[in-house]
Image: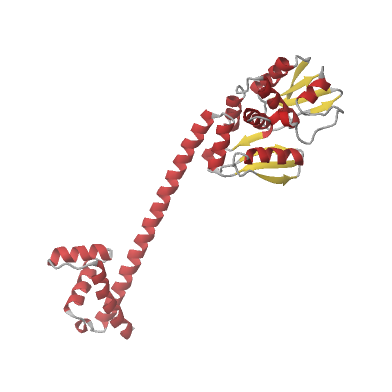
Amino acid sequence: MSYTTQIKNEIVTKDKTKSELISLLSAFTRNNGHIENNNLLLTTENSLIKEKIVDSFKVLYNPHINVEVKKSLNFSKKDLYVIKVSSNLEFILEDIGFYNKRNSYLEIPPSYITDKEEEVKSYLRGVFLSQGSINDPKTSQYHMEILVDKPQESIFIQKMLNGYDLNAKILNRDKGYMIYIKEAEKISDFLKIIGAIKAVLYFEDIRIFHDKKNLTNRLNNCEQANMDKVVASATNQLKNIEILEENLAIELLDDKTREALEYRKKYPETSLKELSEIISLETGKKITKSGLNHRFRKINELASKFR
């Protein structure tokens, strides 16, 4: 079962009151339904959504409803449920904000459809049940989208989403308009808004895992970069020492600098900090990383003359 299906199965039972059911049916019908031979046709591959839509129509309007099962034409291999509402249609379509009193399609639903916050949430649930999807967070590609046919409807949905500060955007596609959200935190907020609590917990668990994994990778990369820097610095110091030895120039250095030179040859892969601690421990004379670095600068300056 896909993550999107799990979300839809969870939210399909949320709407209870009459106003919530009207908002749900309005969203689902406006983004899924079409009129054919004086019948309202709605489609879904999800049996729970089919039952919810049929039950909601019956509770609110008790029309004559017929459900046909067809083989899906896409690659999902799931049956396609075709819900046909064939009575009391004029009143129903006007009541759910699909048509106005002149039987003309409404670009956006009437204000009473989303007048209250719970009705807004119901509308968003209806839209998602009809045309929404969210990537499984395991893919590491956070993406939520809702596909709609009509431009004004896409803007209407975007405004509702951004009323919750979800930063939803619209992309014009060949077959309609895609409202999408890319930010993981915003997708999680959307799931909370539509009441998909189990889906939120799953999403957050995976997101936290990814964040920890990314942090670990960054720390490892940082540690590796530091190691590379230590090796490069030590290698450069050893090359300078080699130049001085080839030119018999070691005696030109003072005692403390020659001491640093000998310890670098003895511990060729240690960092300056570690080398300063070793020298301090073995000689009983404390030397700081800064002091040791000053000695190696002397070696570098002398080697540069011979180089």
In the rendered view, tell whether residue 191 sits above or below residue 57. Answer: below
Q: What residue sits 17% from the left and 65% below the top?
A: 280
* Color scheme of the displayed model: secondary structure
Q: Nearer the viewer, residue 252 or 210?
A: 210
What x and y, as percent, mark residue 196?
56, 29
In the rendered view, tell whether residue 172 sits above or below residue 95. Answer: below
In the rendered view, tell whether residue 74 sits above or below residue 300. Answer: above
Q: What residue sits 77% from the left and 39% below the top?
A: 150
- The mark total stands at 0
Q: What residue sits 20% from the left and 63% below the top?
A: 277
Where, by quadrant of the figure, is residue 106 drawn? top right
Asked whether, in this view, residue 79 is left or right of residue 288, the answer is right
What x and y, as percent, mark residue 206?
48, 38
Where, by quadrant of the figure, is residue 67 drawn? top right
Q: Nearer the viewer, residue 27 or 129?
A: 27
Instruction: Check the picture and name the quadrant holding the N terminus.
Output: top right
Where, by quadrant of the figure, is residue 84 drawn? top right
Instruction: Check the picture and name the quadrant holding the C terminus.
Output: bottom left
What x and y, as percent, mark residue 90?
83, 22
What x and y, as percent, mark residue 216?
40, 48
Asked whether, in this view, residue 192 is left or right of residue 227, the answer is right
Q: What residue sits 59% from the left and 30% below the top?
A: 194
Residue furthest toward the left?
284
Asked whether, in this view, residue 99 is left or right of residue 291, the answer is right
